[in-house]
Amino acid sequence: MKRLIALLVGATLVAGVQAAEKAKSSSKKTDTAKTEKTEAPAGPKVSGKSQEAADGLTAAQKKALLSLLNEGTEKQLESLPGLGDTRAKALIKARPLKEVTDLLGVEGVGEGTFMDIVAQAKKGLEKPEEGEPKKKPTTKKGKKKTTK
C-alpha cells in the first residue's frame, strides 16, 4: 500500500512539473511574439493635414524633394526649414525615404517641420549638385609678377 501511494505521489509530481514546463515554454513563445510585434517598425503616422500637403506637391516637386532628402549632404539638409545638425543626421540614418511622408518617421521631425519643408518644396528647392562647394579656379604656376 505504501508503494502504491508513493507511486501515485511521484506520478502527480512528474505530471505537475511537465505541465509547468509546457506553460513556461508557451509563455515564452507569446512573449517573443509580443516583442517581435513591438519591434517591427510601423510607418510614420500621417495626419490628414500632412497627407493633403504632400498630395499638393506636383510630381516634379516630390521628385526634387525626395532627391534632396535621399541624396543631399548634411549641409544641404540643414538648409531646409526646421532641420538642424541633429535632425539632418537623423534623416541621413533614416535613408532611403520612399515617400515624402516618410519624413514624418524621422526622429525630431513633426508635423510643423514637415509642413514647412513641403511649403519650401512648393517654392523650389536647391538641387543636390548645386549645394556642393565649388572648386576654386586653379592658377597657372609661374613667376610672380612684381610691381615697381
Image: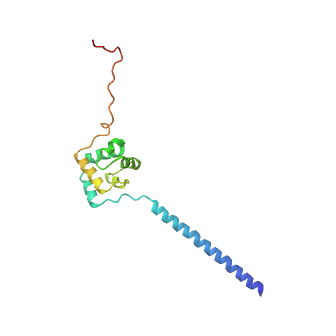
Q: Residue 29's spot in the image, x, y percent?
A: 54, 66
Q: How many labels does the image show?
A: 0
Q: Is residue 54 visible?
A: no
Of 64 and 89, nearer the camera is: 89
Q: Please, which residue is most extreme toward the left here?
A: 123
Of 45 and 4, nearer the camera is: 45
Residue 3: quarter of image: bottom right
Q: Please, which residue is most extreme toward the bottom here?
A: 1
Q: Residue 106's spot in the image, x, y percent?
A: 37, 53
Q: Is residue 16 left or right of residue 100?
A: right
Q: Residue 73's spot in the image, x, y percent?
A: 36, 41
Of 124 and 30, nearer the camera is: 124
Q: Could you tell me which residue is drawn at 75 percent across and 85 percent down?
A: 4
Q: Residue 47's spot in the image, x, y percent?
A: 29, 60
Q: Is residue 15 visible?
A: yes
Q: In this view, does 115 lie to the left or right of 89?
A: left
Up/down of 68 relative to 28, above or below: above
Quarter holding the N terminus is bottom right
Q: Please, which residue is most extreme toward the top here?
A: 148
Q: In this view, does 88 lie to the left or right of 12?
A: left
Quarter holding the C terminus is top left
Q: Could you tell me which residue is drawn at 29 percent across and 53 percent down?
A: 113
Up/down of 106 relative to 12, above or below: above
* Image color mode: rainbow
